[in-house]
Image (cartoon, grey):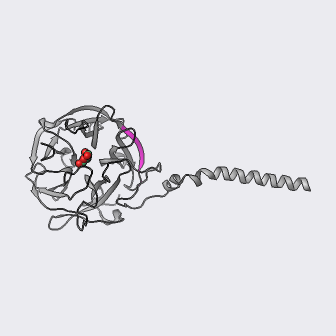
Amino acid sequence: MKIDNRRHYFLKLIKIIISFLFALPFQTNTAYSQQMTENTSFKPGGQWLADDGEHIDSHGGNIIYVESSQTYYWYGEHRGIPRGASCYSSKDLYNWKNEGVVLEKGEIEVFERPKVVYDQGNKKYVMWFHFDNSKYLTAELGVATSASPTGPFVVQDHDRPNGHESRDIGMYFEPDTKKAYIGYAADHINKTVRMVELSNDYLSTTTNDVDIDAHCEGPGILKKNGKFYLLTSGCSGWTPNPATYYTAENIMGPYTKHGNPFVGDAGNNSFNSQPCFIFKIPGYKDAYLYMGDRWNGRGKPESEYVFLPITITEEGEMEIHWYNEWDLSMFTPEKTK
Ligand code: GAL
């Protein structure tokens, strides 16, 4: 009897130890348990974990939607180690899978603001980026390509477009003509923005390259009802500032200057963010996603994102309102999928 009892307690103890050892990783790795929570909304300015439980490290970039795989890809600066371009994929824009560093910058001193366009005909992903030296005086556009959305991207070239300085860049893809354009903070040291049309294969810039009188950075472009909107930040490095928007009947201008679209922006600092891209969300009417970076004065890997809906009012004015939390139900679906 005594022996049986001892055996019983011994087995019980073993069971407890085994269940404790199995449960341990789940209890101690809070990142893992956080990763299990599915996101159902955008929370501007908050910590945003990818599937690996780490804060998304993809700054100053853009989002594309690939119809064939019904997948969104988010590219941006990977500001952690190794420096370069990161890629995340998603089916719903809220939950992102880390696809890793798709371009390592290597010898490039400054690699910033990557923007990807998909060449459907040639099944090629083309990444444009700000190529510079540490003093920001090289001021060139770089271009890299990949056969897969998740890389690796290989640098093909870098140069000043039509001889002009190029620093912060934005991109606009015209779905009707399949043409792509780059808006770039240009001469001399961002005193003006230029808009350049890319070649049909998106691999080079053309000579269709115009000057827009705007001393600014962080250009983002959208089109509504045939009218183009160019959103820009001021020039104060990592520190946020008031934004300005411009409108034109043609992507190449002439552009008219308007005010600051951030409504009720008490700090007059674009809700503590700097624009990097405007993504037209497919499947919804007039669904324009403002993508901004909250650099926190430093541009660290843990910098947050400010994603907000952009409204174009009936009078044709651009407005960006703050929401602590919001989701796509704010937009009207164009068709049921
Ligand atoms: C900002 C620019 C960033 C980065 C930073 C460096 O004005 O938008 O992309 O270049 O300056 O200080």
Q: Residue at 74% of width from left, 52% of height from top?
A: 15
In magenta segment, residue 98? yes
Q: In the image shown, does 227 or 81 lie closer to the viewer? A: 81
Residue 116 visible to an observer of this rendering: no
Q: Residue at 38% of width from left, 59% of height from top?
A: 46
Residue 115 found in image quarter: top left
Horizontally, residue 186 falls left or right of residue 53, namely: left
Q: Quadrant of the N terminus?
A: bottom right
Q: Is residue 257 above or below residue 147?
A: below
Principal SS element in the magenta part? strand
Q: In the image shown, does 168 or 63 lie closer to the viewer? A: 168
Horizontally, residue 275 falls left or right of residue 315, namely: right
Q: In the image shown, does 69 or 280 lie closer to the viewer? A: 280
Residue 162 found in image quarter: top left
Q: Quadrant of the C terminus?
A: bottom left
Residue 114 location (% of width, % of height): 28, 43
Residue 17 location (% of width, % of height): 71, 51
Horizontally, residue 42 falls left or right of residue 199, namely: right
Q: Which residues are magenta?
A: 95-102
Horizontally, residue 200 falls left or right of residue 305, namely: left
Residue 138 location (% of width, % of height): 20, 35
Q: Residue at 20% of width from left, 42% of height from top?
A: 167
